[in-house]
Amino acid sequence: MARSSFCESIDHEALGKFWLDYYETGLARGFAAREEADANQVIDVRFADLIKNPLSVIHQIQKIIRLGGFEAWTESLQADSKALEKKVPGRHHYAAAQFGLDPNEIQERFNTYIETYKLR
């Protein structure tokens, strides 16, 4: 969707391959960086939890890193949240096949991530 304004035609298969490779490489880099980091340098946050209750997640992070100012963060996030509610964009629905991708290949290539974070 983002490219459609700038291109006459889009090679959906090339686009699918690019993003699949891009995210696989990014995850591999993330796992490598995580292995080198101390345990106290990494905090895992589930995206679904962040969307469901951002203030709770931020409060948990602040407690872990011992960062004060929760009240100020709460006020700021509540104001931002109200502003964003008014600007909810339409949702786009895509399928792997639209981009020449096989869901089984995607599953296989991201299996380490899926298993590590118990996403099944």
Image (cartoon, grey):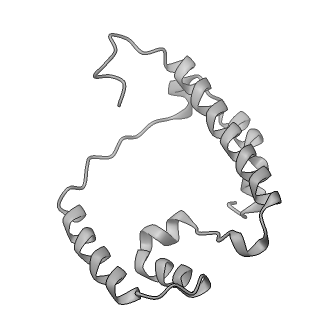
> Viewed as shown, does residue 53 lie left or right of 45?
left
Coordinates of residue 108 in the picture (x, y in percent): 77, 40
The reply to whether residue 1 is visible in this rendering is no
Instruction: Give the camera-side residue of 14 and 62.
Output: 62
Instruction: Give the camera-side residue of 24 and 115.
Output: 24
Total marks shown come to 0
Task: Give the residue displayed 72% in from the left and 55% down from the top.
Answer: 114
- Residue 109 picture quarter: top right
Instruction: Give the camera-side residue of 64 and 51.
Output: 64
- Residue 64 picture quarter: bottom right
Task: Give the residue displayed 59% in from the left and 69% down from the top.
Answer: 45
The reply to whether residue 15 is visible in this rendering is yes
> Viewed as shown, does residue 113 lie left or right of 71?
right
Q: Is residue 115 above or below residue 39?
A: above
Task: Give the residue displayed 72% in from the left and 64% down from the top.
Answer: 118
Residue at far top of view: 8
Residue at far right of view: 35
Coordinates of residue 59 in the picture (x, y in percent): 48, 84
Instruction: Give the camera-side residue of 41 and 111.
Output: 41
Coordinates of residue 41 in the picture (x, y in percent): 70, 70
Q: Is residue 104 above or below residue 58?
A: above
Q: Is residue 25 above or below residue 53?
A: above
- Residue 19 picture quarter: top right
Coordinates of residue 116 in the picture (x, y in percent): 77, 60
Q: Is residue 60 above or below residue 42?
A: below
The N terminus - image quarter: top left
Task: Give the residue displayed 81% in from the left and 58% down from the top.
Answer: 36
The C terminus - image quarter: bottom right
